[in-house]
Image (tube, rainbow, N blue to C red):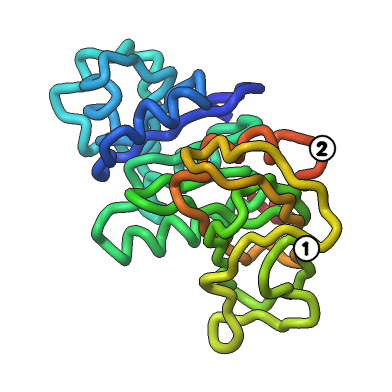
Amino acid sequence: MIVHKLEPILLVGAGALPEGLWDEARAIAPHVVAVDGGLRHVLAKGDMPEAVIGDLDSIGADRVHVPAARLHPIAEQDSTDFDKALRNVDASLILAAGFSGPRIDHQLAVYSGLMARAERLCIVLGQSDLVMLAPPHMALDLPEGMRLSLYPMGQVRGRSSGLRWPIEGIAFSPQGRIGTSNEVVRAAGAAQGGQDQAGGQGTLCRVEIEVDAPCMLLILPRAALPLLPSSLLGSACGRWTARAGQ
């Protein structure tokens, strides 16, 4: 393990960083790890990564600005730089920025990486959306009416409360039933929550989701980011175990 922290870590890739995303992520993650060419973003923000991980074929002249002890080249070419970083960092929560660019093949590789390292609680930050692998069980406080999509990367079943369309009894599969464009609703009889802290004026509703396999992507609007750490770092959020041989 190259980096192990109790607090959240921000992984920074070489892709585009949408306006304001750096500040939003740094407000949550006190530690920064650059992933290969993502080093240029970190240095441009006047920051210094605690480690630079990847095959390091894209850092160029930026290498001289980083202490040699913080450079961690991994030469093998059988995995992406995102996977190299994800398997070598451990934290209570990992945010990943600079990995959701216009290349669909790159995005799919990142989502495959989330499944391969299911034991890592990681949120991929994009221009307008957040994507994470749903843990075995979680409880989130989200604004009423917020879009919440579930996309299966394999066969998976689950149960939910606080969603307009409950998922219990559904056999999800990428070749069959998917769960895009669901919506947060207040459960019948539930107490009204506080003001939405994600930039709106709505009320917060409790959403509970359980899934039976580490292959369900949870997709939320970027505005949900400030609300997630308190939920994901609590006892109501489960964790997958590492797959054998990893």
Q: Residue visible at 39% across and 37% down?
A: 74
In the figure, 84 relative to 71: above or below?
below
Residue beneath the point at 55% across and 57% down: 146
Can see residue 245? yes
**Element class at badge 2:** loop
Looking at the image, the residue that sits furthest to the left is 61
Residue count near mark 1 (Cα–Cα under 10 Å), binned few <14, some 14–19, many ≥20: some
Q: Position of residue 75 (x, y in %)?
A: 35, 41
Q: Position of residue 163 (x, y in %)?
A: 69, 65
Name the residue type under label 2: Ser
Residue picked out by circle 2: 235
Report the disc number at residue 90.
Answer: none
Q: Residues within 10 Å of mark 2 (few under 14, many from 20)?
A: few
Q: Position of residue 132 (x, y in %)?
A: 55, 53
* Residue nearest the viewer, comparing 160 with 75: 160
Q: Amino acid at mark 1?
A: Ser
Outermost residue on the right side: it is 189
Residue 17 found in image quarter: top left
**Is residue 93 toward the left or the right of residue 12 in the image?**
right
Residue in the picture at 34% in, 15% down: 48
Q: Nearer the viewer, residue 68 or 154?
A: 154
Residue located beneath label 1 in the image: 161
Q: Secondary structure at mark 1?
A: strand
The residue lying at 35 percent from left, 30 percent from top is: 22
Give the number of callouts: 2
